[in-house]
Image (cartoon, rainbow, N blue to C red):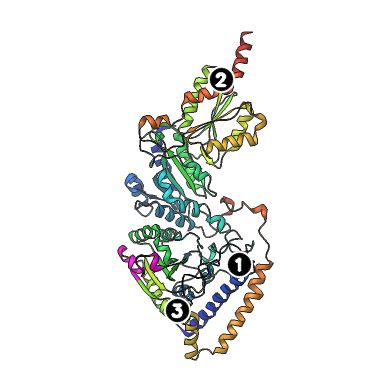
């Protein structure tokens, strides 16, 4: 294992994939400035700064992907993706289908989002569900340093367009990354971060940490929470979530993104349509508010689901069960 | 252009014209659904440029008025018609329809329904050519109205900055849907807008194929020689409305008649007759022969082809490794 930050893991993934496959190129806002060693190793034709114009960056990537290259584009912040919507949603996601399968669009669009830097709503907007809703696109949003590396490498090798979101509060976190020559994490596989039998907490990105903290606190109260990190939002690993639900019968879905039509709503729908018979309590969603991200630290943090809120929700769901268990313990 | 080439192109242009007119009829008969944008009046543009380029070798991308461009690049008219019919044998297996004809084998990179959408894709195709070091060029055919999209400017900037091998062909037919260019665009002559990006630009008559061909030869040579992008504006006219739902209430019949006197097919035909290369009887026979081909082969194929299977509704959404496409070459270490 090597210890490194998310930022370093992303850089390693880019360097390794560019070394491995000469069709991979990196274009975007400031990529050559930020990653001088990649320019030195792979040349300015493959690592290139672009004008600050997201529609042409993404559109260029789509055209290059259709012609056999595997572009990675850095669009900096997730809200900037709305400038690139036509290329990503209407072209990358649809042209394979519209052409009857004649083309592939192997490209990765990277961007950052999330609270933690007080950057305001035009730099911080967890809009990942918008892309999960668009056909033909895959959506990845890791939480651990190892996953940032392994999932980015897998995304670059995927033959489909992948939206790769980096929670900016996780950019400087440190973590262990396996030293294997080719550390890949397959897209579409959730990770069970903690095993438990009483309740299933499902999340992704920074709120996985919130769920793990909550699970720790719940443990002290004798409640065993299972924590699932989705890692890939699309394709969604339904099997892992359902398997856990069949065991626990209780679901708390936690996202920083707002709730309406979001991933938490999708998880709730999954639970009631596919595991209704196993549910022992109504599903709980803990999400960010339906409001733009504030730049105030206080407001920004207030918009985040907390471990305390998760604990409270679980206690509410388990209320009767806890009373019964305590009663059994005293007899 | 050599006499033999002119005769061949006339034959192709008659096919393009009659194909489109037959689409009109099939649409009225409700054999074709969706939106239908027809090309008659503009044939010298696509034909003139592609005669100067290398169809099937150079990459071509365009907007929704795309049937003729696809056929000119080498797509089978039968597959194009079947696509309009929404059949499984269509060039996009019935998933695209009139506005989304694709033929990857012929490097026809598609019809695109969003105005201006192909601009950045053309830049990307050119970037791929540049990186792979081939002698192909990317050709982006679009109408004048597309130039009012922001990506027009983003693309011109990037193409010039990166010296991309891309030829922009603006088929200026004077109308964006039902709005005349004077009422939508501050600068009527589109090539003037390009000068700001240090991209060489030219304008010419888009009705006379020999004029288009000469202008396009210069343009193609410029791009293929590694000098970066070029912008060619062709002044032309579409006889039909924007699409089938357009009754042309925004322009006069007199204006239409004036343009029809400069019909691209008749200009070429009359020149060949004057040169003694063909007679009017030859031309009439050609039209009949073309109609028979369209009826007996193209329409027959489309009508008799199977519908896509409903079980395949979600097929082709995602790529999987089992179906690697032949032209996606490149080596992985």
- Which of these two is toward me, B249 or A250? B249
The part of the image, by quadrant, that contains residue A268 is: top right
| Mark 3 neighbour class, 10 Å CA radius: few under 14, some 14 to 19, many 20 or more | many
3D distance between C-alphas at marks 1 and 3: 26 Å
3D distance between C-alphas at marks 1 and 2: 63 Å
Q: Position of residue A140 (x, y in %)?
A: 49, 41
Residue A271 visible at all: yes
The label on residue A223 is 2
SS type, badge 1: helix
- The residue carrying mark 1 is B79
Note whether A213 is above or below A67 in the view shown. above
SS type, badge 3: helix
Q: Position of residue A149 (x, y in %)?
A: 45, 39
Q: Position of residue A215 (x, y in %)?
A: 51, 23
Which residue range is magenta in the image?
Answer: B181-201
Residue B187 drawn in magenta: yes
Q: Specify whether B270 is left or right of B311.
A: left
- Which of these two is toward me, B286 or B27? B27
Residue at mark 1: chain = B
The label on residue B209 is 3
Residue at mark 3: chain = B
**Residue drawn at point x = 35 percent, y = 51 percent:** A52
Q: Specify whether B287 is left or right of B156.
A: right
């Amino acid at each position: 294992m090597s210890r490194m930050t998310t930022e370093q893991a992303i850089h390693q993934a880019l360097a390794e994939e560019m070394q491995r496959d000469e069709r991979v190129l990196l274009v975007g806002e400031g990529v050559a400035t930020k990653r001088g060693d990649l320019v030195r190793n792979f040349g300015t034709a493959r690592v290139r700064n672009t004008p600050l114009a997201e529609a042409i960056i993404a559109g260029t990537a789509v055209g290059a992907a259709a012609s056999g290259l595997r572009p990675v584009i850095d669009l900096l912040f997730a809200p900037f993706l709305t400038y690139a919507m036509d290329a990503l949603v209407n072209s990358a996601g649809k042209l394979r289908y519209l052409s009857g399968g004649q083309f592939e669009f192997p490209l990765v669009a990277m961007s950052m989002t999330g609270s933690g830097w007080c950057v305001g709503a035009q730099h911080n907007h967890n809009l990942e569900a918008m892309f999960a809703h668009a056909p033909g696109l895959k959506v990845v949003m890791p939480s651990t340093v190892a996953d940032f590396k392994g999932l980015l490498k897998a995304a670059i090798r995927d033959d489909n367009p992948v939206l790769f979101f980096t929670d900016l509060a996780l950019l400087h976190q440190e973590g262990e990354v396996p030293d294997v020559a080719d550390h890949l994490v397959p897209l579409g596989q959730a990770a069970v971060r903690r095993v438990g039998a009483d309740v299933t907490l499902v999340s992704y990105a920074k709120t996985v940490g919130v769920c793990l903290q909550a699970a720790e606190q719940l443990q002290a109260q004798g409640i065993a929470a299972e924590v699932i990190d989705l890692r890939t939002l699309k394709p969604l690993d339904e099997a892992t979530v359902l398997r856990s639900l069949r065991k626990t019968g209780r679901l708390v879905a936690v996202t920083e993104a707002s709730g309406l039509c979001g991933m938490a709503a999708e998880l709730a729908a999954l639970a009631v349509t596919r595991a209704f018979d196993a549910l022992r309590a109504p599903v709980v969603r803990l999400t960010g508010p339906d409001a733009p991200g504030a730049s105030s630290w206080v407001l920004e943090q207030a918009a985040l689901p907390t471990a305390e809120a998760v604990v409270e929700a679980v206690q509410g769901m388990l209320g009767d069960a806890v009373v019964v268990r305590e009663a059994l313990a005293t007899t | 252009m050599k006499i033999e080439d002119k005769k061949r192109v006339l034959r192709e242009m008659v096919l393009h014209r009659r194909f489109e007119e037959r689409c009109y009829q099939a649409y009225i008969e409700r054999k074709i659904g969706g939106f239908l944008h027809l090309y008659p009046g503009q044939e010298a543009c696509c034909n003139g440029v592609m005669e100067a380029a290398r169809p099937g070798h150079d990459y071509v991308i365009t907007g929704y008025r795309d049937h003729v461009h696809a056929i000119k690049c080498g797509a089978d008219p039968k597959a194009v018609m079947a696509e309009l019919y929404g059949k499984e044998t269509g060039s996009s297996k019935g998933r695209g329809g009139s506005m989304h004809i694709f033929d990857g084998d012929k490097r026809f990179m598609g019809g695109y329904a969003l105005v201006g959408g192909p601009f950045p894709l053309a830049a990307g195709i050119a970037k791929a050519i540049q990186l792979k070091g081939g002698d192909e060029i990317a050709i982006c055919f679009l109408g004048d109205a597309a130039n009012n999209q922001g990506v027009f400017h983003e693309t011109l900037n990037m193409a010039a900055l990166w010296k991309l091998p891309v030829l922009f062909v603006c088929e200026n037919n004077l109308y964006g849907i039902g709005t005349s260019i004077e009422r939508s665009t501050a600068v009527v002559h589109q090539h003037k807008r390009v000068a700001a990006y240090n991209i060489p630009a030219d304008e010419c008559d888009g009705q006379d194929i020999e004029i288009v061909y000469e202008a396009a030869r210069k343009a193609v040579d410029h791009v293929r020689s590694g000098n970066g992008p070029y912008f060619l504006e062709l002044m032309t006219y579409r006889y039909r409305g924007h699409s089938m739902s357009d009754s042309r209430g925004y322009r006069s019949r007199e204006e239409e008649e004036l343009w029809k006197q400069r019909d691209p097919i008749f200009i070429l035909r009359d020149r060949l007759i004057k040169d003694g290369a063909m007679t009017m009887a030859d031309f009439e026979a050609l039209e009949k022969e073309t109609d028979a081909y369209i009826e007996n082969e193209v329409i027959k194929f489309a009508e008799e082809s199977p519908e896509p299977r409903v079980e395949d509704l979600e097929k082709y959404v995602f790529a999987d490794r089992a179906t690697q496409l032949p032209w996606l070459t490149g080596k992985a270490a």
